[in-house]
Amino acid sequence: MSFRRTVTQDVEVSGHRFTEGEKVVMFFNSANRDERQFADPFSFDITRSPNAHFGYGGGGPHFCLGANLARRELRAIFTQLLRNLPGLEVTDEPDYLDSAFINGIKHLSVRVR
């Protein structure tokens, strides 16, 4: 959800001056709400086009090398889980992780019918 880096040399970006040694943070979810890129950036619009967002890795040099393996593993896990427990249903709201680094579900209550 975020990247923190240390500035290695003095630089100016979009009118803001950064000095060597300064800590900077980029929040991926903020990029998805950029008024310069999206007409209505704070509304969920599945038909938004073009939609060059960062929600699924965004590509580039920092794209997670394990992303494709993780997708494949999750697909295998859920395929088997749903095949063996077809009556599985969510019974309560998810309990989300309290983290500024990872977005995810900590606990999810389910039952099998």
Image (tube, rainbow, N blue to C red):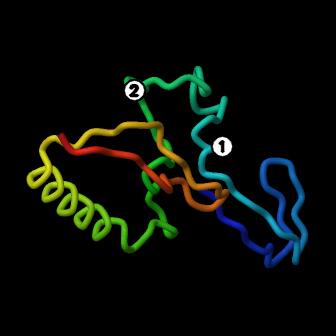
Q: Is residue 97 above or below residue 52?
A: below
Residue, x 28% and y 61% (percent of image)? 71
Q: For residue 111, which quarter of the picture?
A: top left
Residue, x 48% and y 52% (percent of image)? 105
Residue 82 x, y percent position in the rendering:
15, 50
Q: Residues at badges 1 and 2 in contact (C-beta under 8 Å)?
A: no
Left or right, residue 29 beside residue 56:
right
Amino acid type, residue under disc 2 in the picture: Ile
Q: Residues within 10 Å of mark 2 (few under 14, many from 20)?
A: few
Q: For residue 78, which quarter of the picture?
A: bottom left
Residue 23 x, y percent position in the rendering:
83, 69
Amino acid type, residue under disc 1 in the picture: Ser
Residue, x 27% and y 61% (percent of image)? 74
Left or right, residue 104 beside residue 22:
left
Q: Which residue is mark 2?
A: 46
Q: Is residue 24 above or below residue 95?
A: below
Residue, x 69% and y 57% (percent of image)? 26
* Distance from the alpha carbon under mark 1 to that under mark 2: 17 Å
Q: Earlier in the sequence, mark 1 or mark 2?
A: 1
Q: Secondary structure at mark 2?
A: loop
Residue 30 x, y percent position in the rendering:
66, 43
Q: Secondary structure at mark 1?
A: helix
Q: So how many labels did they put on this image?
A: 2
Q: On the rendered image, what quadrant is the C terminus found in? A: top left
Q: On the rendered image, what quadrant is the N terminus found in? A: bottom right
Query: Closer to the camera, 77 or 29?
Result: 77
Left or right, residue 82 beside residue 41:
left
Q: Which residue is mark 1?
A: 30
Left or right, residue 102 beside residue 58:
right
